[in-house]
Amino acid sequence: MDGMPQVKPARPVARGRLFFANPGPTNIPDSVLLATARASMDFNDPAFLAVYDACVEGLKKVLKTKQHLFMYTASGHGAWEASLVNTLSSGDHVLIPETGHFSDSWAKMAKALGLRVTLLEADWRRGIEMARIREALAADTSHDIKAVCCVHNETAAGTRLPVEQVRAILDEVKHPALLMADTISSLGCFDFRMDEWGVDVCVGGSQKGLMLPTGFSFTGASEKAMAAHRASKHPRHYFDWTEMLARRQKSFVGTVPVTLFYGLQEALRLMLDEEGLDNVFSRHARLAKAVRACVNHWSGNNGPQLFCQNPERASDSVTAVLMPEGHDAEKVRKIALERFNVSTGGGLNKLGGKVFRIGHLGDLNEPMILGTLGAVEMALSLAGVPHAKGGVQAAMDSLASS
Ligand code: PLP
């Protein structure tokens, strides 16, 4: 035996920190990393249970709910699955307004789980018109649709969907469908109010606005969702809320990711006590505005442009940048990573090679954003992509005035 296989460095050694501008996972604050550096512990140890209970309370504050919270040792896909199998039955009809890759993936999962899915197709760049959702729900006079599944922030397109307006439509047309919201890349980045907006099931994950490693996801559930759960006949086990309610933690069928909860405790302290949720949101809004100012500047000389064409829907978590015709986004990403140690997100699904994405969510400040934008601007030059130079200055001007 020769021991561990040697791993060759994938790229030249880079000094300094990796500038991580991916739209999830995101940067993890040092204090959160340190909080997770703990020896293993029994998940029924009273010392852990006290931390756990505080985390549940804190997470409910971020979700702005006083209702139920169920957690899973799974990435966001697990919470997506939990939302569907706990509240619906095979053959039930769900309406999914299309926002991009993630609405389509949730729809694909729903179909695979035996649900009937209507995906309301829409332009990924402009975001779906609310009138289309209203029309679909108003036409459903027999109330065949059992749930409306909305992606609050479409991570692939850099657009947001106003979930509160979907609630207003449901109320207006007196439709009893459950309102579900995927908050995976909006939670802890911009405002989400589960109870006030009448969201019945919301889906979230650890590795984005919560600034934690990937490793657990969760669903908030309203009393109405719990009633639907009791009536639902979908086969399930690991994600079963009834199984969970019988346990001390009221979540997790199986081992609880204890160390992540020590990280969550610290992340919640940073968000709720040290910075304050409203300040977290205004920081995200400020950084997002600066990124958009930069990309708008680059669009001169037929350069890359904002993928989102509807400013009202622009995301404060992530900006997708559309390349000029004939230029490959992957080339720019590769140069940014290999030359400047800056990691950005790639285009997903039909946007592969056409867009790159700058994540501006989580533990991030002005110099980190400016460093990323500077490296990307250099990468555009090195890749021979036309653009107006001076995007970073436009971002600096935006930051200085906001
Ligand atoms: N929904 C949204 C909006 C996402 O951004 C993601 C992942 O990026 C998912 C769902 C899927 O989550 P995961 O990759 O954690 O399974």
Image: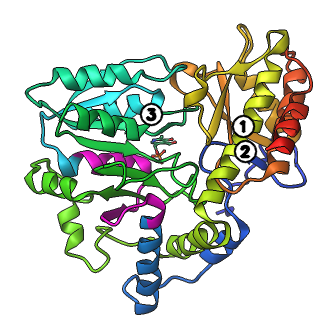
Q: Are marks 1 and 2 in contact (CB under 8 Å)?
A: yes
In this figure, what is the number of numbered marks? 3
In what quadrant of the picture does the N terminus appear? bottom right
Assess whether mark 1 and mark 3 are in contact (beta carbons under 8 angstroms).
no
Ranked by sequence position, the earlier of labels 3 and 1 is 3
Asked whether 179 or 241 is in front, the reply is 179
Residue 77 lies in the magenta-colored region: yes
Give coordinates of residue 136: x percent, y percent: 24, 21
The residue at the point 57 percent across, 21 percent down is: 351
- Which residue position holds label 2? 286
Say few, some or many: other residues with alpha carbon within 10 Å of mark 2 (under 14 / 14 to 19 / 20 or more).
Answer: some
Residue 233's disc is none
SS state under label 2: helix
Q: Secondary structure at mark 3?
A: helix
Residue occupied by mark 1: 289
- Residue 40 vs 234, above or below: the answer is below
Beta carbon of the mark 3 residue lies under 8 A of ligand 1: yes
Is residue 139 toward the left or the right of residue 294 in the image? left
Q: Label 1 amino acid?
A: Lys
Q: Which mark is residue 102?
A: 3
Extent of the magenta region: 61-84
Q: From where the camera sits, is residue 94 visible? A: yes
Kindly identify the amino acid type of the residue bearing the numbered disc 2.
Answer: Arg
